Image: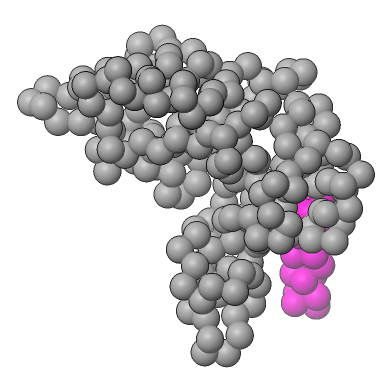
Amino acid sequence: MREILGRRRRLRFRRKARAARQDAAVTFAVQWDWPVLPGVGLEEPAPVTKTAGDGDGRVCACPDPDCVVPGAHPFDPGLLAATTDERMIRWWWTRRPDAPIVLATGGRAPCAVSLPALAGARALRVLDEMDMRLGPVVATPTRWSILVAPYGLERLGELLYAKDSVPSSLRFHGEGGYLLLPPSTTGTGQVRWEREPLAGSARPWLPDVEAVVDALVEASRATPGGGSRLAY
């Protein structure tokens, strides 16, 4: 009896999680005008052929047995298929309810600046101390990503060229890039909001990339003795 009740609870939890993913994808695409698509996701491993995956034994559903970002990237459809069309979003997540939500960054969509998780936690504390206004922040077990207003590669290049130094831990998700959004599950674990979008927002406010990079560079230099708070 306990086994049956436990199975029912797991099925209810799975159905709830699947509905939450589809609802989130529709919100991003339709309400916020963020183009999204389903990520490749995870699957049960074939005997012997695959070894890399998450803690529950599942592996990336792509053909690469040594995928370094299991479940956490586009595959089929490709990144260019990202859309804000509600019918397409619902069709995708009806067919693949466990698929992670992938945001195609750049263009009219948000971009992001990401750091290793430990550096990201430190950076947010420093930015709060500096009264830096931030928008949504996405967290995974390995990296944290600060969402910023859309920017072009030329603008980013000019910004970085003007800096004496930029922390090597930073990565930039701009045009032609992508970022996973909550609530998704990948080979490294859950994707969640570290800073959630404000409830009831028609579309989340996003800071300019210049302001975020300036603040992160300043935070990186803020450790006495020449160390960096943003180091790996």
**Left or right: where does residue 187 sit relative to residue 24?**
left
Name, please, the residue furthest toward the right. 87
Depth check: 131 or 211 in front? Answer: 211
Q: Residue at x 80, y 75 (%)?
A: 4
Q: Position of residue 186 (x, y in %)?
A: 57, 58
Colour approach in the figure? one colour
**Left or right: where does residue 52 sit relative to residue 160?**
right
Q: Position of residue 175 (x, y in %)?
A: 57, 35
Q: Position of residue 103 (x, y in %)?
A: 65, 41
Q: Residue at x 30, y 17 (%)?
A: 162
Q: Position of residue 203 (x, y in %)?
A: 72, 20
Name, please, the residue furthest toward the top. 131
Classify residue 124 by image quadrant: top left
**Left or right: where does residue 85 sit relative to residue 218?**
right
Q: Residue at x 35, y 16 (%)?
A: 214
In the rendered image, residue 59 lying in the magenta stretch gets the answer: no
Image quarter of the N terminus = bottom right
Count the labels in the image: 0
Classify residue 213 by image quadrant: top left
Depth check: 67 or 174 in front? Answer: 174
Asked whether residue 13 is in view, the answer is no
Asked whether residue 108 is in view, the answer is yes
Name, please, the residue furthest toward the bottom. 47
In the rendered image of this protein, does residue 90 appear above or below residue 197? below
Q: Residue at x 71, y 61 (%)?
A: 76
Image quarter of the C terminus = top left
Write the start and end of the magenta stretch as one range: 1-19
Name, please, the residue furthest toward the front. 154
In the rendered image of this protein, does residue 189 appear above or below residue 49? above
Q: Main secondary structure of the magenta part?
A: helix
In the rendered image, residue 16 lying in the magenta stretch gets the answer: yes
